[in-house]
Image (spheres, helix red, strand yellow):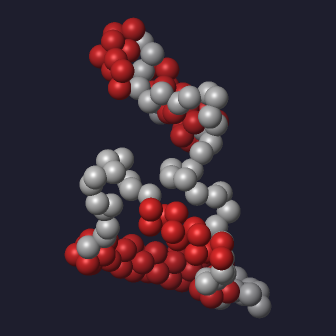
Amino acid sequence: RILYARWRDLLSDYAAPLALLLFTGLSYVPEIDRAIGHARLKVPDEIGLIPSFPRAWLNPLLPGSAASASAAAAVAAYNVTGDPDEPPRVLEPWHIVAAAAPALMLTALFFFDHNVSSKLSQHPKFNLQKPSSYHWDFSV
């Protein structure tokens, strides 16, 4: 055994924040800091949180409303390339088809994973009493 059970449990509970702190601290080691140089992300203090392009924080939910039309116009007018002479980038049909393949695989994975884990947890040896809302997770 590498660690006592209590230490392993503690480490597994806090592994993600500890890894974040470890590697953030590691990036400030002088030799590694010189290698990174100016590649570190600079976040300005005075601006705070801003949207990725000029838009409101709250999205209009009613299609056809004036707020929805002005939001659509703002998005259409924004050029993600940053160059006003270059046309804005749009998704081509093959982009959507290429994204649909992994999306369908993930959907099937989640579906089968849910079914297998629910069947395993319903084994008669566990004496599971199903509540009235047992299958609502599929409808949600």
Residue 111 picture location, percent across and down: 46, 81
Image quarter hosting the C terminus: bottom right
Q: Which residue is outermost to the bottom? A: 132
Q: Closer to the camera, 43 or 36? A: 43
Left or right: 128, with 104 as reference point: right
Res. 10 in view: no
State which quadrant residue 130 falls in.
bottom right
Left or right: 112, with 8 as reference point: left
State which quadrant residue 14 falls in.
top right
Left or right: 128, with 34 as reference point: right
State which quadrant residue 11 falls in.
top right
Q: Which residue is outermost to the right? A: 132
Residue 21 picture location, percent across and down: 54, 28
- Residue at image position (51%, 52%) is 53
Residue 82 picture location, percent across and down: 36, 47
Left or right: 35, with 73 as reference point: left
- Residue at image position (63%, 88%) is 139
Residue 54 picture location, percent across and down: 55, 53
- Residue at image position (67%, 86%) is 136
Above/below status of 12 relative to 66:
above
Q: Which residue is outermost to the top? A: 30
Res. 91 in view: yes
- Residue at image position (48%, 27%) is 42
Count how many numbered circles sit on residues in the image: 0
Q: Closer to the camera, 131 or 61? A: 61
Q: Which residue is outermost to the front? A: 85
